[in-house]
Image: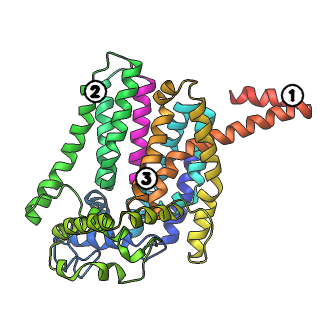
Amino acid sequence: MVIMILSVLARLAGAVFMGNSVEELPGTFDQISYHLLAQRVLGGYGFSFGQDWWPLTAPGAPTAHWSYLYTFYLVMVYAIFGVHPLAGRIIQALIFGLLQPYLTYRIGNRLFGKWVGLVSALLAAGYAYFIYYGGTLMTEPFYILAILWVFDTCIGLVTQPKADKPLRRWFLLGIGMGLAVLLRQVFLLMIPVILLWLGWALYRRQPSFRFVSLLVPLLVVAVMIMPFTIYNTARFGRVVLLNTNAGFAFFWGNHPYYGTDFQPILPDGVYQELIPQELRGLDEAALDQALLGRAMQNIMDNPVRYVKLSISRIRDFFMFWPSPDSGRISNVSRVASFGILWPFMLAGLIVSWWKADKTPQKRLDSPVTLLVLFIVAYSVLHIMTWTLIRYRLPIDAVALPFAGYAIVLIDRRWLHIGQRFFGFEEVSKSVQAVRE
């Protein structure tokens, strides 16, 4: 409870610092879009903008580029409290501040025990990136919560396969996956990875496991997406599953403009200039699909360049050092979070996975493997498409229990050193007894 209170206070401080206006801070341009879009929806204009807007949307034209779910959240807040961004920031900071350390604790506790769970929750509460983004009017906080919800539920299904109400737990897994997809449709690509591992792990524990259970979360996700698919199809005259942003991202992220050296942020106006003139008359949905085709053609024309470009994105995705090209807020947030903890995350991940079981086959059954698979798959996905540091934040959130595990191992190692060389045996035993 103390950790959760500290988490809330830290995120509330960040929200109050950002204030009641919506301005472009480093890595937060999307909040301006959501702020304007929510006002348009509230004013009865639907999902559209009143002026030319990102990515290349004409005034009054339909847009599906942005998360419907998060827009509805802001619409609800503005409808109740008036158009006061600070209200949205505070509510979001409260929810994120309470639930993120709680879910992180649950995952750490399920995997490594209570002490690791507490340390992991404390790391989540004080993680600078999460404090910074906790008050921004963007999908990051709720998206991270949905992902933690998914993994907490998955680990519970595997570690307690005979618990009561199995259908309810599969349904809750589907709700978590659906929320993640409605906030960021990229999570759709993670669902097969998660469910395939889940089916394998449960079958290994219970040969009588019914694989039909895996259809429950898939059906829940389909039901949650369906209304937006129908809405998009009616507006654009073509089937649009959810959002119109995959083609834009893949086209811009792999354009020959970069050569073989990726740049996370291009100068103002460059993104629009890269779009071929003959495609600019298309609506947003048609343009998104056309750009996806152009991106694939660019890759086929020069696959070697694409591979080198993707390799160059590794540096930007895992950047943990200060940069002269970044502002003070970005540098401080980066170093005071991932910059400090990535060695612990990596060490905890390697040690915990290796110690999961002596045989490789049984090691694959461990819930630790599920988190490792997500970290690897999610990293590869963004390294092959488009990379921004904030796209890595879900990985940071999932990796914090590994950092907690490494810190606890180091702490216990120091206890053993004290016992052996400095005669702290009685004190060490007392501390260890309390912890156990």
Q: Which residue is mark 3?
A: 380
Q: Quadrant of residue 63?
A: bottom left
Q: Amino acid at mark 2?
A: Leu
The structure's colour scheme is rainbow
Circle 1 Cα neighbour tier, 10 Å, few/some/many (<14 / 14–19 / ≥20): some
Q: Which one is earlier in the sequence, the residue at label 3 or at label 2?
A: 2
Q: Answer with mark 2 or mark 1, whichever residue precedes in sequence.
A: 2
Q: Is residue 122 above or below residue 170?
A: below
Q: Quadrant of the N terminus?
A: top right
Image coordinates of residue 395 in percent, x first then y, are 48, 50
- The residue depicted at 60 percent of the width and 54 percent of the height is 126
Measured from the top left, where is residue 190 in percent x and y?
35, 46
> x, y percentage for residue 74?
31, 63
Callout 2 secondary element: helix
Q: Kindly report the distance in space between the C-alpha atoms of the residues bearing marks 3 and 2.
A: 32 Å
Secondary element at image label 3: helix
Q: Quadrant of the C terminus?
A: top right
Task: Say which of marks 3 and 1 sits in front.
Answer: 3
